[in-house]
Amino acid sequence: MAVLLKDAIKPNLVQTLEGNAAILHGGPFASIAQGTNTVIATRMGLSLGDFVVTEAGFGADLGAEKFLHIKCVSSGLKPDGVVVVATVRALKHHGGVHKDVLTNSDPDAVRKGFCNLEKHIENVQKFGLNPVVAINAFPTDTNDEYEVIKELCAQKGVKAIVSTAFANGGAGASELAAAVVESIHEGDVMRMPGLPAIPSAEHIDIDDN
């Protein structure tokens, strides 16, 4: 075991299908741990590139909270931008549509289910950061559904961009990337939300309510 782990502290450099550099190091699920890669990996990326994209697992109520409260606080790192990923299918499901008919166009259900995405946006905004919403496109999505998301995000002061990266690779995410860079240049500065000095269990009760 010692032989297997002797180089474990060193990040792994791999590449995407399009030849971009990616650093793999750590990254346990947010449901059982902190849900982020290591501080070493992030700092290594920052030393090598102009932009570093890292994932915080699950939603903004779990992965992002842990990323900001644990990784950023302990390391001193501060993200310049945040992307919240959403799908039309998920919003329709939150709006009451049964999973068997999620492929049917239903802008009204998207509007009804937006309250879920709205809360994730607000969670990020509490840290002084205005996210960009990436709409992860599916073939069954419709433009009417996209427009509902864009409209409601705009009311929160947030841009929503359709990403077809799964189907089209980097080219499918170029508009999203441009929006993220633009948001970074707006100069948002991460801040920790003011929390009362009470036991953690009481914080949980407050969050639940």
Image (cartoon, helix red, strand yellow):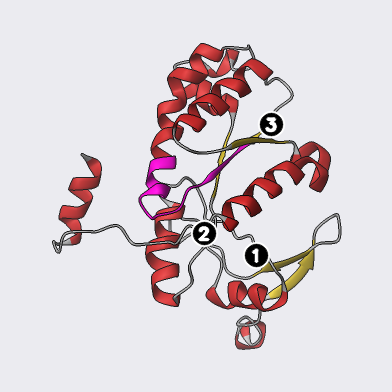
Q: Earlier in the sequence, mark 1 or mark 2?
A: 1
What is the distance, in whole Å, between disc 2 and disc 3 at their CAs? 28 Å
Which amino acid type is shown beneath numbered disc 3? Ala
Between label 1 and label 2, give the one nearer the viewer.
2
Q: Position of residue 111 (x, y in %)?
A: 48, 19
User: Mark 2: which secondary structure?
Assistant: loop
Label 1 environment density (alpha carbons within 10 Å; few <14, some 14–19, many ≥20): some
Which amino acid type is shown beneath numbered disc 2? Gly
Q: Earlier in the sequence, mark 3 or mark 1?
A: 1
Q: Quadrant of the N terminus?
A: bottom right
Look at the image and say whether residue 129 sits in the magenta stretch.
yes
The residue at which mark 3 appears reads as 137
Say the numbered circle drawn on residue 187. Answer: 2
The residue at which mark 1 appears reads as 52
Q: Position of residue 82 (x, y in %)?
A: 53, 52
Q: Earlier in the sequence, mark 2 or mark 3?
A: 3
- Depth order, front residue of 41/76: 76
Q: Is residue 114 above or below residue 30?
A: above
Q: Residue at x 70, y 49 (%)?
A: 177
- Depth order, front residue of 20/121: 121
Which amino acid type is shown beneath numbered disc 1? Val
Say the numbered circle drawn on residue 37. Answer: none
Q: Quadrant of the C terminus?
A: top left
Q: Position of residue 31 (x, y in %)?
A: 43, 52
19 on left or right of 42: right
What is the distance, in whole Å, between disc 1 and disc 2 at their CAs? 17 Å
The answer to whether residue 33 shows anywhere in this view is: no
The part of the chain drawn in magenta is 121-135
